[in-house]
Image (cartoon, rainbow, N blue to C red):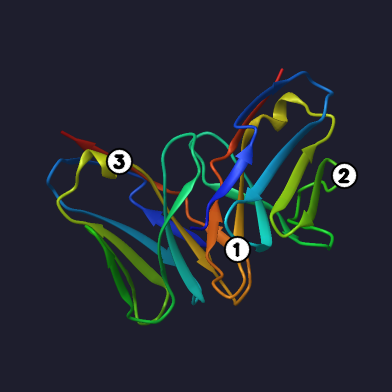
Amino acid sequence: GAVVSQHPSRVICKSGTSVKIECRSLDFQATTMFWYRQFPKQSLMLMATSNEGSKATYEQGVEKDKFLINHASLTLSTLTVTSAHPEDSSFYICSATILVQETQYFGPGTRLLVL
Amino acid sequence: SQELEQSPQSLIVQEGKNLTINCTSSKTLYGLYWYKQKYGEGLIFLMMLQKGGEEKSHEKITAKLDEKKQQSSLHITASQPSHAGIYLCGARRAAGNKLTFGGGTRVLVKP
């Protein structure tokens, strides 16, 4: 149980375009989803916390207009990187929690390359 | 300084040998999580520790949390190539709060 999927797994886009990444909890309802980014050989950095039906809470230094998060249902959260630039190239990972358990279950990640 | 320090940063062990990874916090933790990540992939949940002095085991992996809830160790017995990867500890400071991750420990098991 507790499977989280992400789509796409890899994406290459041109600078200036927007990219949407989906995060789904497949066999449970996720009350909260988290979005992280990870640079090569570095640890995970939390970008934002997303609760179903409410606005996401962004970490300090993360531009909310740049990284749009939508959490429309208990099984789906999306991260849209708007007007992507090469410095946005990174590995983006989402996680989801089941109410009460508090353990975060992670998706397989999305590798974004902006040319 | 980092809130969560992991050591060592990397580790190479011979297959069959034991290894230990440490995770230290400057503040008392509400919960401590251990994950494993293979390069370019997501994180696999290993164990969660919440009580001071708690110890959990799964197959050949044992995790402990000290009485003060500021230090945790992950111990792998008789390591195998399948144990290779990046081990990350994640700390929760309060109930329902976010996780802060350590820098990770890269483990390579030589056959």
User: Which tag, 1 or 2, sits closer to the chain's start?
Assistant: 2
Amino acid type, label 2: Asp
Residues marked 2 and 3 touching at CB (< 8 Å): no
- The image shows residue A6 at horizontal and vertical percentages of 62, 41
- The image shows residue A73 at horizontal and vertical percentages of 77, 57
Amino acid type, label 3: Ala
The label number, if any, that marks residue B84 in the structure image: 3
* Mark 2 element type: loop
Q: Work out whether residue A6 or residue B1 is closer to the camera in this orientation and state it.
A: A6
- The image shows residue B111 at horizontal and vertical percentages of 15, 33
Marks 1/3: CA distance?
A: 26 Å
The label number, if any, that marks residue B87 in the structure image: none
Marks 2/3: CA distance?
A: 39 Å
Chain on which label 2 sits: A
Chain on which label 1 sits: A
Marks 1/2: CA distance?
A: 25 Å
